[in-house]
Amino acid sequence: MPPGTVVLDIGKTNAKLTLIDADGHTLAEARTPNTVRNLGPYPHHDTERLWAWMLGQLRELSQRAHIRAIVPVTHGATAALVDDAGLVLPVLDYEHVPGDAADASRYAGLRPVFADSGSPALPAGLNLGRQLDWLAARFPTEFARAKHVLMYPQYWAWRLCGVAASEVTSLGCHTDLWRPAVGRFSSLVERLGWEPLFPPRRDAWARLGVLLPELAADTGLPADCEIVCGIHDSNASLLRHLLTLKQSGPCTVLSTGTWLIAAALGSATKPLVEAQDMLANCDVFGEAVPCMRFMGGREFGALAGERPAPFTAADVERLIARQTMALPCFVETGGPFAGQIGRVVGPMPQNDAERAALATLYVVLMTDHCLQALGASGRVVVEGAFTVNPWFGPLLAGLSDGRDVAVSDDGSGTTCGAWLLDAWGREAAPAPAPVAAWCPPGWRAYRDQWRQGL
């Protein structure tokens, strides 16, 4: 059988297992919804269902390749409290609001300032420190039992190999837990005495150990299958561009999925503004990367529906001509316009195709806003879920005043980066060629009108 790598990619909406060969080609893929359970003490991720699903898929994949390594990749703002036996509390869903107004006020007095942490004050549990503080106050007995706080990729690595580790891309992802400028835990961690709970920091590409013997026997995977430390998902999308930055120059990577995150690799020219949901994420080397984000996939679904219909250029041109536009925002969580109520102005869309076209116009305009607010220069590369939308890249390029916009061939946005962690030291694939810009009649004037409506 050919050698292969398995990428375990747990996104906020779906989880996916991908089998990749030694040349980076996908051999097989399986996915399942990432469900949240509302039973028990609070809404939490159904880790046991994911675990059972993953083991079942690994049994099947073990028949297709000699699997040398497993690389975990997950969404951010999530951690697991464990002792030697497993979870001491369920893994809290970051969309749950932890505690009441008094809890929020108390935490506001504890959290580090934006200039220190690079983490803006975010709603619900998007600041991981707020989750941990609430869990410690609400469940003191269970919290005291915890041996480790594991960031979510490293939780899955620990379940697979038994080795506990921390890693900087998840530690530095709007958590309030990390100081990107100095590569140390924040004043919040120091003040609350949490530092001993975090295992030693390891590189994202480090081999933590081999698959536990009982799991190798259960799945049929080789006994020497290595478990890679793992990475935060939007940082996986950055990785191949980060590795070629010196050759290709500054760029902005759009990691698209439930969230759309604009990460300015050497390309930001404006200061970060906390109120705009700008932040400093940490890349795989621990360096701060200026970012701005909104819940692009979730908002697209709110406008287009669960099963977006195909649409044509004529649908787009008709909406622009009628001045039908969507103004932010259509989710309750995060983004530069959090707290505003989304609305459609002008004649309403007439059918499913127009609704999907309007959703596309909306996410393109929001992305353009983020690029402008960051002062992003250089080319733009689209990774992830929006790569399958044939209009997103060309419409964005139509607003970009000659700036190149390229659309990745990696539809997950994370698979290539995760594979590179296992193939560390190999040259990353070059960025894709730019797409042809499309500027329908009145498109830039429509953008200007949309901005005025903000």
Image (cartoon, rainbow, N blue to C red):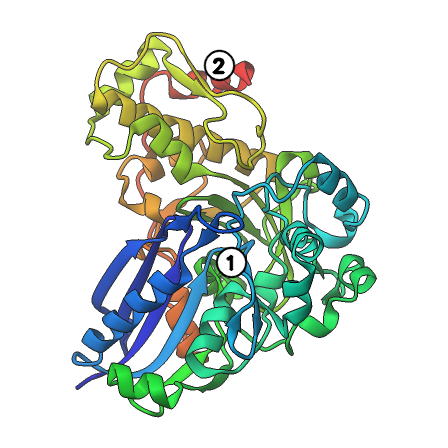
Q: Which residue is mark 2?
A: 449
Q: Is residue 375 above or below residue 61?
A: above
Vertical relation: 100 (above or below) 143: above
Q: Is residue 165 left or right of residue 353?
A: right
Category of crowding for the residue at label 1, using alpha-carbon neighbours closer than 10 angstroms: few (below 14), some (14–19), many (at least 20): many
Camera-nearest label, 1 or 2? 1
Residue type indicated by callout 1: Val
Which image quarter holds the N terminus?
Answer: bottom left
Label 2 element class: helix
Residue type, numbered disc 2: Gln
Location of residue 240 by image quarter: bottom left
User: How far apart are the alpha carbons under marks 1 and 2?
Assistant: 43 Å
- Lower sequence index among marks 1 and 2: 1
**Residue at the spot 35% in from the left edge and 69% down from the top edge:** 7
Residue 303, x across and y down, in percent: 35, 26
- At which x and y percent is residue 79? 56, 61
Res. 43 visible in picture = yes
Q: Position of residue 148 (x, y in %)?
A: 62, 72
Q: Nearer the viewer, residue 80 or 144?
A: 144
Residue, x 69% and y 68% (percent of image)? 144
The tally of labels here is 2
Q: Which mark is residue 91?
A: 1
Residue at image location 26% in from the left, 74% down from the top: 58
